[in-house]
Amino acid sequence: MTYVPNPARYENMPYRRCGKSGLKLPAVSLGLWHNFGAIDSFENARTILKLAFDSGITHFDLANNYGPPPGSAEVTFGKIFKEDFKNYRDELIISSKAGWGMWEGPYGDWGSKKYLVASLDQSLKRMGLDYVDIFYHHRPDPETPIEETMGTLDLMVRQGKALYVGISSYSASETETAIAELNRLGTPCLIHQPKYSMFDRWVEGGLLDVLGDNGVGCIPFSPLAQGLLSNKYLKGIPENSRAASHRGNGAIEEDAITDEKIAKVIKLNELAIKRGQNLAQMALSWILKDDRITSVLIGVSKPEQVTDSIKCLENISFSAEELNTINSILG
């Protein structure tokens, strides 16, 4: 049966301008880091993507190494894109990245021109695309000159393989350097993708200021600390949870779920209930309260988690008392 998107898909999703660019992203975007690999259910992945688009989520975020195994999330997405989304390409923002280990030998990792060019060519082939909307350098490379890495991002835009470029996991000072180099080249840095959640607030130590001052967007990943900031682990580690799956590829492991963390989660959950939200919704709202945030990336294993996450948009304002309570809980 031919997929026909929800005709009302744009009515309830707010779209935020990405820095000072002309591009807007949905307040909630879908990340394919986990649950879209070859080891996962294809039909479940397909259902999640269609529901996301039906709900106004126009941005799907991938990377060369997403899976497992690496590359398989892009293969899965490519098959679904061909079957369901090809006629809607101009309504989608599709991103990929390169910067982590992808293939053996000296040319399959980090930030050299050799690696980034080859990686994007492979990603486009896996997804069946002519171009990606955003291409990121996935992490800073301490050995490759920033001029080479940023020069390659600029080249990808000039060759028509990417419309915009971004960086991920760069520190505040590294970000300033990258932004300056891309500006010099004439291909501005569109967006930064950092890890950011109530349990990991490093971006508040300068990065958000750099992005705001330079008109660069921000789209945090792992806003729920891979499910820790949800109701999932309130009573232990469920058998079907990510922590119990041992799937690798950066997924949360059981030793990250400590008694101390759970005690904080329980208190945060109590506050969320008072706000009329569940904990996951409050954790997403807490990130979106900052107008320097363009969008927040959600990762889901079930379609209903898409619908549940989007409900965070019903209340993204926090009182001073609520923020003080959160800070007190987190310590």
Image (cartoon, helix red, strand yellow):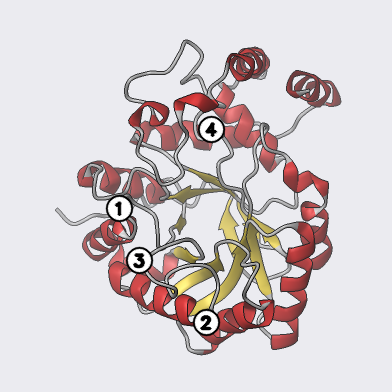
The residue to which callout 1 is attached is 69
Q: Is residue 305 left or right of residue 156?
A: left
- In three-dimensional space, the C-alpha distance between marks 1 and 2, rounded to whole angstroms, equals 24 Å
- In three-dimensional space, the C-alpha distance between marks 2 and 3, rounded to whole angstroms, equals 32 Å
- Residue 260 falls in image quadrant: top right
- In three-dimensional space, the C-alpha distance between marks 4 and 3, rounded to whole angstroms, equals 25 Å
- Residue 287 falls in image quadrant: top right
In the image, farthest residue toward the left: 1
**Which is more toward the observer, 188 or 68?**
68
**Element marked by disc 4:** helix
Q: Is residue 125 above or below residue 73?
A: below
Earlier along the polypeptide chain: callout 2 or callout 3? 3
Q: Is residue 135 above or below residue 295?
A: below
Amino acid on which disc 2 is placed: Lys
Amino acid on which disc 3 is placed: Tyr
**Element marked by disc 3:** helix
Disc sitting over residue 311 in the figure: 4
Disc sitting over residue 235 in the figure: none
The residue to which callout 2 is attached is 113
Earlier along the polypeptide chain: callout 4 or callout 3? 3
**Which is more toward the observer, 37 or 18?**
37
Earlier along the polypeptide chain: callout 1 or callout 3? 1
**Which is more toward the observer, 72 or 3?**
72
The residue to which callout 3 is attached is 88
**Number of residues whose C-alpha sits closer than 10 Å to that of mark 2, classed few (under 14), some (14–19) or many (20 or more):** some
Amino acid on which disc 4 is placed: Lys
Considering the image in quadrants, where does the C terminus appear? Answer: top right
Question: Between tags 1 and 3, which lies in front?
Answer: 1
Question: Between tags 2 and 3, which lies in front?
Answer: 2
- In three-dimensional space, the C-alpha distance between marks 1 and 3, rounded to whole angstroms, equals 28 Å
Residue at horizontal 79%, vertical 62%? Answer: 173
